[in-house]
Image (cartoon, helix red, strand yellow):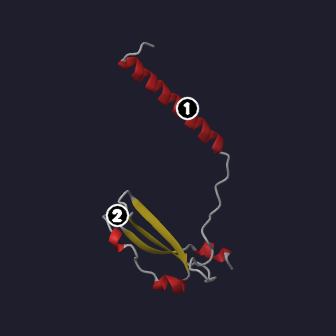
C-alpha cells in the first residue's frame, strides 16, 4: 500500500479487525474456564473480630487526587455495622454512595 492517508487508514482498519479477531479467539478459549471463587470474607473485617460477616458496607467517593472514584467495601458483623458511618465526606461528589446491605442468607449459612 502506498504511504497515503487512505493507505494508513486502511492499515489501521485491518489492524483493528485483526485485534478484534484475536480478542474473540481469546474469549472463546477462556469460555471453558471456571468462574473464580467468591473471595468475600466469611468473618468480620474488623481486626480481632471472628463473628460472621452479616453486612457489607459500601462507600464510593472521589479520590483525593481527583482522578476518579474509589469504592471501599467492608464485610462486617452486626455489632460493627452499627458503629459504621461515612468516613470520606470530603470526597463527596454527585455519584457519592454510602450503603449498608445485608449479605445473602445462603452465604451466612456457609459459615455455620
Sequence order check: which comes first, mark 1 or mark 2?
A: 1
Q: Position of residue 85 (x, y in %)?
A: 42, 80
Q: Position of residue 61 (x, y in %)?
A: 38, 66
Q: Position of residue 52 (x, y in %)?
A: 62, 80
Give the labeled residue for mark 2: 95
Q: Quadrant of residue 93?
A: bottom left
Residue at the spot x=37%, y=56% of the render? 67
Answer left or right for 99 relative to 38: left
Looking at the rendered structure, the secondary structure element under dot 1 is helix
Binning the other alpha carbons within 10 Å of mark 2 as few (below 14), some (14 to 19) or many (20 upward) gives: few
Give the labeled residue for mark 1: 21
Answer left or right for 90 relative to 1: left
**Residue 24 vs residue 96, the one in the foreground:** 96
**Residue 72 vs residue 57, the one in the foreground:** 72
Q: Residue furthest top?
A: 2
**Residue 32 vs residue 63, the one in the foreground:** 63
Amino acid at each position: 500500500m502506498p504511504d497515503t492517508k487512505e493507505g494508513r487508514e486502511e492499515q489501521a482498519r485491518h489492524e483493528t479487525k485483526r485485534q478484534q479477531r484475536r480478542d474473540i479467539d481469546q474469549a472463546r478459549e477462556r469460555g471453558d474456564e471456571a468462574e473464580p471463587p467468591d473471595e468475600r470474607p466469611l468473618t468480620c473485617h474488623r481486626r480481632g473480630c471472628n463473628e460472621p460477616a452479616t453486612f457489607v458496607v459500601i462507600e464510593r467517593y472521589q479520590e483525593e487526587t481527583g482522578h476518579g472514584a474509589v469504592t471501599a467495601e467492608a464485610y462486617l458483623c452486626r455489632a460493627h455495622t452499627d458503629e459504621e458511618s461515612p468516613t470520606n465526606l470530603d470526597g463527596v461528589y454527585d455519584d457519592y454512595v454510602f450503603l449498608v446491605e445485608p449479605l445473602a442468607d445462603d452465604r451466612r449459612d456457609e459459615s455455620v
